[in-house]
Image: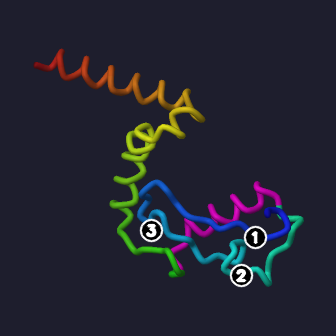
């Protein structure tokens, strides 16, 4: 129904800021249809989401973690997403990057043994 109704927004990748598979309460989401503007583009929605990800304000769907935990999850996100068939189909270049990292890691471990 977008752009006439606001989107429901949820995260699929663990990130330390929002719970996965749970809708997030944002002024640009379906939690607040009264503030929705059909002129908002996907780009403006993503910018709003990025801004909120960088903030620590609590909201429905948010969680509190340390900076270190967020960094650990960010480093693990490519491996997590590469296990998801839809991600593999939509982003083959990232799957290739991940496979290259695995190959380099295995070679490094072999040479240090």
Identify the element where label 3 is drawn. Answer: loop
Q: CA distance from mark 1 to mark 2?
A: 8 Å
Residue at x 49%, y 56% (from the top left corner):
12
Using a 10 Å C-alpha cutoff, classify the residue at mark 2 as few (fewer than 14 neighbours), some (14 to 19) or many (20 or more).
few
Relative to 60, 74 lies left or right: left
- Give the residue pinned by disc 3: 19
Q: Percent position (x, y) of residue 76? A: 37, 46
Q: Which residues are magenta?
A: 41-57
Q: Is 6 inside the magenta-drawn segment?
A: no
Position above or below: 79 against 113: below
- Give the residue pinned by disc 1: 6
Residue at x 66%, y 79% (from the top left corner):
31
The residue lying toward the viewer, choosing from 97 and 38, is: 38
Q: Quadrant of the C terminus?
A: top left
The residue lying toward the viewer, choosing from 62 and 55, is: 62
Identify the element where label 1 is drawn. Answer: loop
Position above or below: 63 against 81: below
Q: Percent position (x, y) of residue 45? A: 73, 62
Residue with the most extreme bottom position: 34
Position above or below: 33 against 51: below
Toward which corner of the image does residue 78 lie, by quadrant? top left
- Give the residue pinned by disc 2: 32
Q: Percent position (x, y) of residue 110? A: 17, 17
Give the mark nearer the N terminus: 2 vs 3: 3
Q: Percent position (x, y) of residue 88? A: 51, 34
């Amino acid at each position: 129904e977008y752009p006439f109704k606001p989107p429901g927004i949820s995260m699929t990748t663990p990130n330390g800021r929002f719970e996965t598979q749970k809708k997030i309460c944002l002024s640009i989401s379906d939690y607040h249809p009264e503030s929705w503007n059909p002129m908002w583009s996907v780009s403006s929605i993503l910018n709003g989401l990025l801004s909120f990800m960088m903030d620590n304000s609590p909201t429905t769907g948010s969680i509190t973690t340390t900076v270190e935990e967020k960094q650990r999850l960010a480093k693990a996100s490519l491996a997590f997403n590469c296990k998801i068939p839809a991600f593999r189909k939509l982003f083959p270049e990232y799957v290739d990057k991940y496979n290259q990292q695995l190959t380099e890691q295995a070679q490094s471990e072999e040479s240090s043994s």
